[in-house]
Image: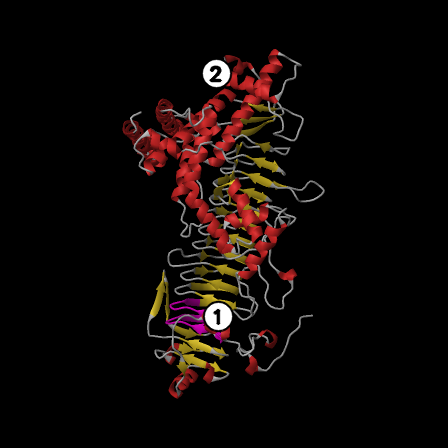
Amino acid sequence: MNQINKKAIDSLGYNFIASEYLPKGKDEYHLRNIQNRSGIQYRQLTAWEIEVLVRNRNASDDWNKILVSDAFNPELVKNCKFFGLVRIGKLEAYYLEYHNLRMPVGLYNSTIISCDFGDNVVVDNVNYLSHYIVGSEVILVNIHELATTSAAKFGNGIIKEGEHENIRIWLEICNENGGRKVIPFTRMLPGDAWLWSKYRDDEVMLEKFKLFTQKEYDVQRGYYGKIGDRTIIKNTSIIKDVWIGSDAYIKGANKLKNLTVNSSSEAPSQIGEGCEMVNGIIGLGCKAFYGVKAIRFIMASHSQLKYGARLLNSYLGNNSTISCCEVLNSLIFPSHEQHHNNSFLCAATVMGQSNMAAGATIGSNHNSRSPDGEIIAGRGFWPGLCVSLKHNSKFASFNILAKGDYPYELNIPLPFALISNDLSKDQLIVMPAYWFMYNLYAIARNEWKYNDRDARINKEQRIEFDALAPDTINELINALQLLALYTGKAFSAKKNPGKKITDKEYIKTGKKLLEANDKIISELEIVAEGLENSDRKTVIIKVQQAYTIFRELVIYYGTVQCIAQVVENDLKNFVALVKQLPSVPKRNQWINVGGQLIAEDEVQKFRKHVHAGKIKNWDDVHAFYTMQGQAYDADKFEHAFAALSEVLNISVTEFTPEIFKQILLQSVQTKMWLTDGIYESRAKDYTNPFRTMIFGNKEEMDNVWGKLEDNNFIALQQAELKNFKKKVNDLIKVLKL
């Protein structure tokens, strides 16, 4: 049965902190006094003020416990019940207006227990308001329950004095069985979540991260909830143990419990109608609207949940939007989009700049033994309409999956690839470099879009949005080896069936054929092994085109980074550039740490520093990200030259002015090809009869789509091409190449 306790009415509003948790020499208000930074000087009520308050149908267990500022107007307090110590700031004869809501300043028709109020607040019809510090010009209207308990943690996974470890809140990201669980905290960055979830064999680091998190917060009981200045909360049912920043807007929410809602004047956060959000952290500038359900979650800054989306046991990265769909047990890096009601994502690490189409089901992680399967998807992951994947699966960067049910686990190391399931032939088809062959507009626009939409105020992590970066370049170079291997094997099977040679010899043969653009390649059926967990064929198509494109892109990337090095350092001759080069180029492996690319060597050094106690808290961890971000351009340049020298097969001493001039001119041709491809991939929409058939005439099409010649993004790319040509020509002159 329900246990209902009866206590004396004069104790209501007091003893917020149980005596056993009250520090010696402190009263129950000691933390409250620290939290209240309004600077308001409070005094006791005058006899006349008490008389007015009573006349206005207000009641208090002890009028001596009602403290007010000098500019307090008792006429603006009506039909309220006060219990415990209540402190009220300035109340003046104004009304506050927000959008179409206009409410008179004052306290009306509410039950208020042990709260502090700033200046000129509106509190009207709040049935139960308990243990909150309310800022100035706050509007609280039509709220059933707004309360804080003495052990409130505001969504952080900590435990307070006297609490058992088993009540700690964990986020079971990446894996449904909790094998990669992390402890949420207000400042958790995507990189923090990834490092914590990834290195599960590093027990020392895992324990340190737990201690870092616990040390972030005071374990004392008795902290009040806070509502920052200019925040509006209206027509909401339950808000319990929620810390809310300034300038937030909450309307029509059903239940908000154990949350931190970060919000500021620069980046206000909003929660709308029908939302139910429990045990979570909401970052600056976030939005949640229309029936959202979020349980055990983190929304990093400027992310959105909309239209009934469900987010459970997951981390949603910055500048991401999910609507209508369901996301469970996942870690999502910045800039993810998922907009459709019948898409489902479960037990996944998705590394950003990603998009999930309608009907995509990335959640078949049960193998009849345990729901412990996982998906790992590199940057730019794009499962198309009605895609169904089987866990475990792993994808290189910028993989797109064509519509279909994929019956076997996949491991796709080829980047920028289109993957499709050919039911007619019962085989998997992989087309590397698909984006560059057929949809350059999309990949280039997405790159620009994600940069443009990065609304983060605190950029502690330097997020990489460029499609060509150390992670993808390493994948391209690996893909060149794989394509050569697959081609060499196919050629040998045709010319010397049954003869077995080494992979090294296959690669040598395949590379020779591909770099010669040998016509025999078109006659070969090129297959790969190990990309699908099945006995059927995996056919690689457009191999020659992909190989040529990938090689050209690596050279272009390396050249562009050399150009940047010359320009940024104002180098005046070729010798000065050579002096910037490492004596022995090393193409490091790079890791995507929550959207920030960091050399693997640096990550391993970081782990050692954690072990050694040189990394003492989350501030130190975040300082590591900042340091790596500051060094990124230089590290990227070294990596780029190493990649360039590897593909060109030259050493530093063999890097001559003639070669540099050659690749500079080649880079212009590549930039022209990319720019033309961007235009052509969009232009084909204007001539495709199956696209244009919906229009009665060209004028109608132009009014719906906009004229092709008025496309701002295409114009931007053409302007960039013009500037790039000029930069290269100027460079050739300055360096006297």
In the rendered view of the protein, which quadrant contains the C terminus?
top left
The residue located at (39%, 86%) in the rendering is 46
Residue 517 numbered tag: 2
| Residue 713, horizontal then vertical, whole percent | 35, 36
234 in relation to 676, above or below: below
The residue located at (38%, 33%) in the rendering is 579
Residue 49 in sight: yes
Closer-to-camera residue (214/163): 214
List the single residue furthest toward the top.
495
Specify whether residue 137 is painted magenta: yes
Q: Are marks 2 and 1 in contact (CB under 8 Å)?
A: no
Closer-to-camera residue (582/183): 582
List the single residue furthest toward the right.
369
- Could you tell which of marks 2 and 1 lies nearer the N-terminus? 1
- Quarter residue 439 falls in: top left
Identity of the amino acid at label 1? Tyr
Identity of the amino acid at label 2? Asn
Tell me the magenta residue range: 111-140
